[in-house]
Image: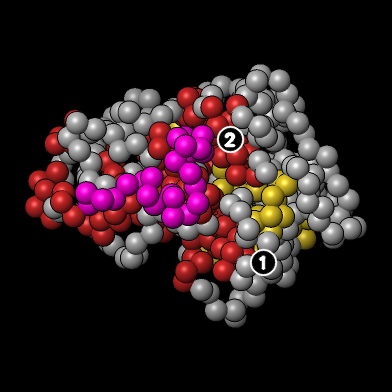
Amino acid sequence: MVDYDYKVKCASERQKVEDEFEYEGCKVGRGTYGHVYKARRKNSDGREYALKQIEGTGISMSACREIALLRELKHPNVISLQKVFLSHSDRKVWLLFDYAEHDLWHIIKFHRAAKANKKPVNVPRNFVKSLLYQILDGIHYLHANWVLHRDLKPANILVMGEGPERGRVKIADMGFARLFNAPLKPLADLDPVVVTFWYRAPELLLGARHYTKAIDIWAIGCIFAELLTSEPIFHCRQEDIKTSNPYHHDQLDRIFNVMGFPQDKDWEDIKKMPEHPTLMKDFKKSSYVNCTLTKYMEKHKVHPDSKAFRLLQKLLTMDPTKRITSEQAMQDAYFMEDPSPCPDVFEGLPIPYPKREFITDDEPTNDNEKSDNASKATGGNDQSSSHGQPPAKRVRVMQPNTNNGTMRNVHGMPGNQGQQHSYSSTQSTQGTNSTVYGQTRF
């Protein structure tokens, strides 16, 4: 038993977050997991950080898993956990992250509003391509180290603002992440309901017990489609389901309305899915004979002959065993054609998106933005959604395939860093390397 006086002595010597950082009045997010603050060191080094205060006393298993993984995972496209602060007096836990000024949820929302108001947004021609490539690069690193993310969605894809990593994508929210190299039991037995509904792969909805990294690839396909169209491709009615049953009729119906009903020849193992009998009882194949991804994307002015569409098809393949891998996707012809992806997704143009606003404790929370507040700036997940899950094991990870933070482009050469233009001028110049969103897809 550790002596109480010794514990108090250690606590007094431990660094306190309030002694090192300024963050009062700088809250940028909140949720059932806790609060997120924009912070700066008191020594005024100028760098911005995100401080996540975990709600309640002590630390949940989900937070333990996230901390354990993030301390080991080091990649330019994965959010970096800088430090953990433990407060002895009030038993609070603080996590220090890189501060990301933007995320894909807000970026897509901004473009959707601009599209509705017919107001153009100036972004580089390779904007979507650069975003997708960096997401794939980060996920490839996680998968190469036997980690499934399991909750990929726009709110968990952060984008850095002005600074040394301007325009860099950061995959965040590792609260649902799991090792999958040698599970003691099927992952579905541990926590069968994972991934936000709209981004959930069909095999999960049909009760797959031994799901794989293909579930992350499906989610990336959903994000890619959303970037191309500004609309969630498999949007359906949301429900707060408190059940371990993964089957969800409305979500499957939405997928089939876009993709068509899966044919046995295209997905041979669908008959082995635990919920296949329920599927055949609830659905009629004839209801979806005219539904195809081609028709859906054509409505959004994405041509079926484009390399972007062909890659999307590979990402959204129904059969998880035939779904493209992250490594294969990074080598796809889409990334070979000009313009090449860039490590600065804004590629030297002024960033058109507003900065995060500070919020107050008495400000009402919009339920529709619950997941975004829980992710903004750090990608922190809702801690209440994953009780009872064991923390991740300590892992030895591979080094990222990048050098000094530069992106390796598809031709094997260091990627173009993108010139950082001064923001003293707010006027956008539209040239060959930019496109005006609102008149054409971005």
Q: Which mark is residue 119?
A: 1
The question of residue 303 being in magenta is answered with: yes
- Extent of the magenta region: 288-311
The CA distance from mark 1 to mark 2 is: 27 Å
Q: Residue 100 carries which label?
A: none
Of labels 1 and 2, earlier in sequence is 1
Front-most of 55 and 79? 79
| Residue type at the position of mark 2 | Tyr
Tell me: 381 left or right of 36.
left
The question of residue 134 being in magenta is answered with: no
Residue 217 seen in the figure: no
Compared with residue 297, is residue 319 higher up or lower down, i.e. above or below?
Answer: above
Compared with residue 238, is residue 123 higher up or lower down, i.e. above or below?
Answer: above
Q: Mark 2 points at which residue?
A: 133
Compared with residue 147, is residue 254 higher up or lower down, i.e. above or below?
Answer: below
Give the quarter of the image for residue 412. top right
Compared with residue 112, is residue 259 higher up or lower down, i.e. above or below?
Answer: above
**Image location (x, y in percent) of residue 308:** 51, 38
- The local secondary structure at tag 1 comes to loop
Identified at 55% across, 32% down, the residue is 334
**Image location (x, y in percent) of residue 264:** 17, 35
Tell me: 399 left or right of 164.
left
| Residue type at the position of mark 1 | Lys
- The local secondary structure at tag 2 comes to helix
Q: Mark 1: few, some, or many residues within 10 Å (few <14, many ≥20)?
A: some
Give the quarter of the image for residue 75. top right
Of tags 1 and 2, the one toward the viewer is 1
